[in-house]
Amino acid sequence: MTQQELQGNLRGESNSIEWKRGGDPKEIVKTLVAFANAYESMASGVVLCGVEEIEHADRRTTPSVVGISESDSRKLRNRIFELSKTLASPPIELEFDSVALDTGKEVLVVRARRSSEVHAFNGKVVVRLGDKTTDATTKQIAELAQRKSNLDWLAQPCPGATVDDISPFALEAIAQGHRPPGGTQQLLEPGFQMFGSVPPLINGTAGQTGDIVSPNRFAMLLVGKEPQRFMRGAFVAFTRFLGVTRADSIFSSVELFGPIPLLIQKVKDLLSLETGFIVDKTVDIRTGRQNRWRYSEDALQEILVNTFAHRDYQDHHSTKIYVFSDRIEFESPGGLVGPPSLEEAKHGRTSWRNPTLARYLVALGLAQERGTGLPKAIELTKFVSGVEPIFRVDEALFKVTVPAYHLPVQKTNGEPVSPKAGVLLISIGYGTIDPSLIRRSDPAFQEMADDRILTFHHPGIVAAEQWPELIREIRNWLRDRMEDHQFQEFHLFYRGPVAVGPLIGALSVARKPLIVYAYEEDLSLYRLAYRLDRRLLLEP
């Protein structure tokens, strides 16, 4: 603290300034705990030890800077530090400084940073009201807890982290667009602000033998070598499935680690494999509009960055990305923050869970300004695929499903499906067939009732000796379905060994008409293959 700053703190005691001649270190720590709770103030609180309060006859008070000896200052500092860990629950973070006086003495400066937690002193929550420290009432404790729940947890020092845990390569990468005057290493100086009013990457906190330099939590996420060491869920689990459900075979699965800017680039590289062209042969080639993007890259990036900027990093679960043949799902721990509803959030009216991290991502050009990311992602997805992303939110999860562009579908033979038709979903050795895939494959099935969709599923590989029993099981299941008088015809959607498909057709056609659909891997849709109808083979 400079002499000028000291004079500024001598204008009067307040809800963030306290003067002490020397005094009882317990009372000093009690005041510092109240400063950390910050009931009335949004700023850090400071205690000036070596400043006596003089009360005049008119009850006006003025400060007298008397100072304390260097040895007494050192002893008082050490005692305050010890008590801040034993009498404060949870312990508070302190910063120590001193101002030398002409008398050879000094003023010991102790600052308590505003905390995201509610602290007690000797078992009682204390608050600062004006220039007085007092025990909090039940109502004040409840108000304090509510306010603390909205503070930025990531803007607090990261316990156990040191400057050695920061990656010089990641630090250099984020410094490129905001080159500090003192070079990249200036970003590691305690208190240096990279831009604007955002908190610094590094803070100096009080230690027994001096200040301990430690990164804030958001700094570990942005430039840390191994962020997951300090926040266990700070990584991405990326999984590709061969089909449209999680029961389908996994094509690839990987866990990605590193600072957020690097994670974003890694995931973008993986997603770029999904955003290629699909050929729409229903469009005249002369129009030049046959090639269609499956996804909007910009929409995927907006949603991806949103999962990092707004997830709950106190949750130990990872960010998860699932790629299916017809969609991509993004899951991040933590629901919406603040009062806005999901509909309001989709229109840009949101609250930031991690405001400091989000502001850094905006400044680094990785995220949009507040409220613009989701509306932009919705608009771009709808432009490419024709439908909006699907959002699911609860207290523990924020999930966004981004649909791929699908080729236009045509109705079976140009006619609607009979209201007395049934759908047979038969899968052998694969996951179950998702009924929503059937509805997407042909608009004729979009209004079909769920009770008209019948499923037979045999998971896993079928050994040779199992086939006779499995064929009997399929035959009996089909016979019961075919004998049900509410169905006049059936539409078969099948996945499994090629030879079994015709067998199913042969078992069915003798009883009722059967329309068979084939699955096209490239399109991730079922298409009409052929119709089997015994009546068409009869002589007139």
Image (tube, rainbow, N blue to C red):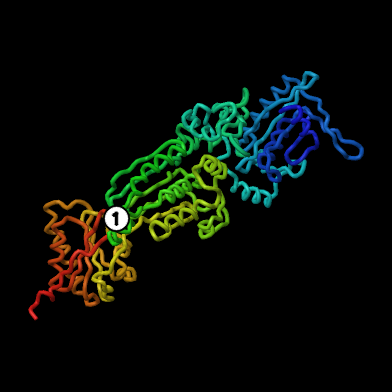
In terms of image quadrants, where is residue 528?
bottom left
Q: Give the percent coordinates (x, y) of residue 511.
A: 15, 73
Q: Give the percent coordinates (x, y) of residue 176.
A: 51, 33
Of helix, strand and loop, which one carries label 1? strand
Q: Quadrant of the N terminus?
A: top right
Q: Residue at x 37, y 41 (%)?
A: 269
Q: Nearer the viewer, residue 35 or 399?
A: 399
Q: Give the percent coordinates (x, y) of residue 229.
A: 46, 34
Q: Nearer the viewer, residue 250 or 412?
A: 412
Which residue sits furthest right?
A: 57
Residue that numbered label 1 is attached to: 279
Q: Nearer the viewer, residue 362 or 515?
A: 362
Q: Give the percent coordinates (x, y) of residue 318.
A: 43, 44
In terms of image quadrants, where is residue 40?
top right
Which residue sits furthest bottom?
A: 540
Q: Quadrant of the C terminus?
A: bottom left
Which residue sits furthest left?
A: 539
| Position of 518 relative to 354 (above/below) | below
Left or right of 327, for residue 165:
right
Q: Residue at x 74, y 25 (%)?
A: 99
| Position of 470 relative to 322 (above/below) | below
Q: Residues within 10 Å of mark 1 (few under 14, many from 20)?
A: some
Left or right of 83, for residue 292:
left
Q: Amino acid at mark 1?
A: Val
